[in-house]
Image: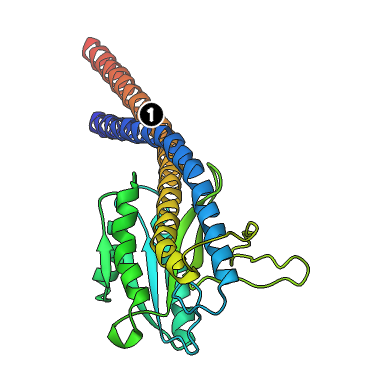
Amino acid sequence: MGAQVKVYKRRIKSVTATKKITKAMEMIAASRIIKAQRKVDASSPYAEELTNAVTSVAYAATDVKHPLTTEAPRPTRAALLLITSDRGLAGGYSSNALKASEHLTAQLVAEGKQVDHYVVGRKGVSYYTFRERPISDSWTGFTDSPEYSDAKAVAAPLIEAIERDTADGGVDELHIVFTEFRSMMTQTPVERRMLPLTFSRSAEDSAAVFAQGVEARPLYEFEPGPEQVLDALLPRYVESRIYNALLQSAASEHAARRRAMKSATDNAQDLIKSLTRLANAARQADITQEISEIVGGASALADATAGSDR
């Protein structure tokens, strides 16, 4: 029985050490969420206003053929940017984004389009590499704290692909899959088409409406011409949208990791309590057995002494 108590104590010590690690990771993730959320709040107004400006110019220049606004008659190729994490221990964060990406890929393929995958994060890269599926480009090492320079690096090949002809390896559409940060407890994978922009005329107010429902501001005055303005705004629009998506994903990753580590810490605490009860029960059984052996030995000695007196 003594050996069993030692086993329980060893397991309690191991779980306690694990609990310290998960608790520390929970606190680190909690501290990073606030910083990431502030970055999201700071970048969102710029991305929305830039989208409004682009939509207004595109609305006014309906006769201009530009990758930002021109819908291909028969789109045959699409680029899909997937944002996952570099590290694990974040619950279902990356797997949920991968599921959303697979759903969108199946939808695009069903529409007769070839899909070129661009992946951010080691989890996504590992997923496609393990399944021997081609990746047009990938980026790693910054998912938990992205900078605008990272967004520019990601946007560059996507802008080049949307500007090229499909016959030369270009794409007709640009889609993005990322995890939207809604609250500390809610993070949702979303699928959005970035290019071409979708907007419609309203007979009532003649306002352009972005595909996600963002209302455009009153039309801007621009020079020298709409095509030059759209050329200048295209990289800014793509970069700002990707940067905002990277920040949303980073905040979601930290929130998911905090939640996962809190769950692991609570489970470790429950396991420690269970192992402590088992160790106490084993020690009590060991003590009871020792007492029984002593009493039995004393009784046998008393019987032996009484027999010799006769």
Q: Residue placed farthest to the right in the image?
A: 204
The residue nearer to you, when weighing 121 against 161, is 161
* Quarter occupied by the C terminus: top left
Instruction: Confirm whether residue 37 shows in the render.
Output: yes
Q: Is residue 194 above or below residue 165?
A: above
Q: Amino acid at mark 1?
A: Thr
Q: Is residue 296 left or right of residue 194?
A: left
Residue at 51% across / 74% down in the picture? 69
SS category of the residue bearing label 1: helix
Residue at 23% across / 9% down in the picture? 309
Q: Which residue is mark 1?
A: 276
The x, y position of residue 84, in whole percent, is 36, 57
Q: Residue placed farthest to the front in the image?
A: 224
Residue at 47% across / 46% down in the picture? 43
The x, y position of residue 249, in whole percent, is 43, 51
Q: Is residue 241 above or below residue 10?
A: below
Q: Residues within 10 Å of mark 1 (few under 14, many from 20)?
A: some
